Image (cartoon, rainbow, N blue to C red):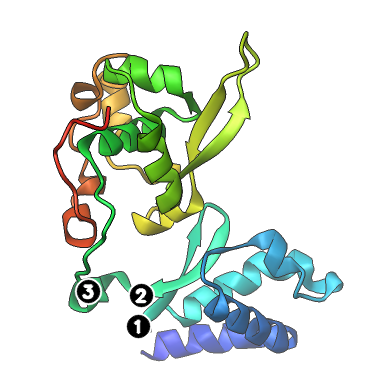
Amino acid sequence: MNQDNNQEKLFDESFEGYAEDMRVLEALLFAAKEPVSIAVLAEHVEENKREALPDILKMLQYRYESHGVNLVCRDGAWAFRTASDLAGRLRIEREVPKKLSRAAMETLAIVAYHQPVTRAEIENIRGVSISKGTLDILIEIGWIKSGRRRQIPGRPLTWITTLQFLDHFDLGSMDDLPGVQEMKDAGLLDKRPAIDTLGQSDMFEDLDTDDEITTEEGDI
């Protein structure tokens, strides 16, 4: 405990001139509905202090380490989130009117592991065509969005995951996708049907408590 107090005292002394900036960032992050990018946070810090912004955020993150909420980084954006060890005690089951089909789950997994990926490439990996409704559902949920167009004939649109996707599955970045490196080493991320290529990744294991999922194949 003394060591923690000494470390916090050292931090306080080092950032003595940034106390007001830290309060502003704290208030901004608490009020934000979604993770806030460094660029947006920098707009609320004095120009001569912006170089110290990453360190200020680290200090704020340290201060909340033992609290019920923690400051987390999601692919360069910052947000306050419930401490991971308390998540199980605070879980609320709710009924979601929009069902996530097996086709949508497979499509989401393909986008996550192969992005940026075109619709034709998704269909090639799954081995079947997909309806526009499948992509629409994932867009509506906020887990995928359109990326850049491929510089090939037809200039097809690519699809990528969003910041909300990382936030929902508690991923700091796409590098944290479960088992992705092992799958690559094993040669599993190739153009075979998605159900075999990607398997049932544990990143989806909590969906059945938060989102209603069916195994219907009608939406393909």
Q: What element carries label 1?
A: loop
Q: Name the residue under label 2.
A: 82
Establish if 60 lies above or below 1.
above
Q: Nearer the viewer, residue 129 or 190?
A: 129
Q: Earlier along the polypeptide chain: callout 1 or callout 2?
A: 1
Establish if 80 lies above or below 172.
below
* Labels 1 & 2 near each other (Cβ < 8 A): yes
Measured as percent of width and height from the top left, residue 179 is found at 27, 37
Give the Cα separation between the discs numbered 2 and 3: 13 Å
Measured as percent of width and height from the top left, residue 46 is found at 82, 76
Residue 55 visible from this viewpoint = yes
Q: Mark 3 points at which residue?
A: 92
Residue 16 visible from this viewpoint = no
Give the Cα separation between the discs numbered 1 and 2: 6 Å
Q: Name the residue under label 1.
A: 68
* Labels 2 & 3 near each other (Cβ < 8 A): no
Q: What residue type is labelled 2?
A: Thr
Measured as percent of width and height from the top left, residue 87 is found at 25, 72
Which residue is at 55% across, 36% downward?
A: 146
Which residue is at 44% across, 23% downward?
A: 119
Q: Is mark 3 on a helix, strand or loop?
A: loop
Q: What residue type is labelled 1?
A: Gly
Measured as percent of width and height from the top left, residue 160 is found at 49, 36
In the image, taking residue 215 as reference, residue 128 lies left or right, namely right
Q: Which amino acid does label 3 sit on?
A: Ile
Numbered tag placed on residue 81 in the rendering: none
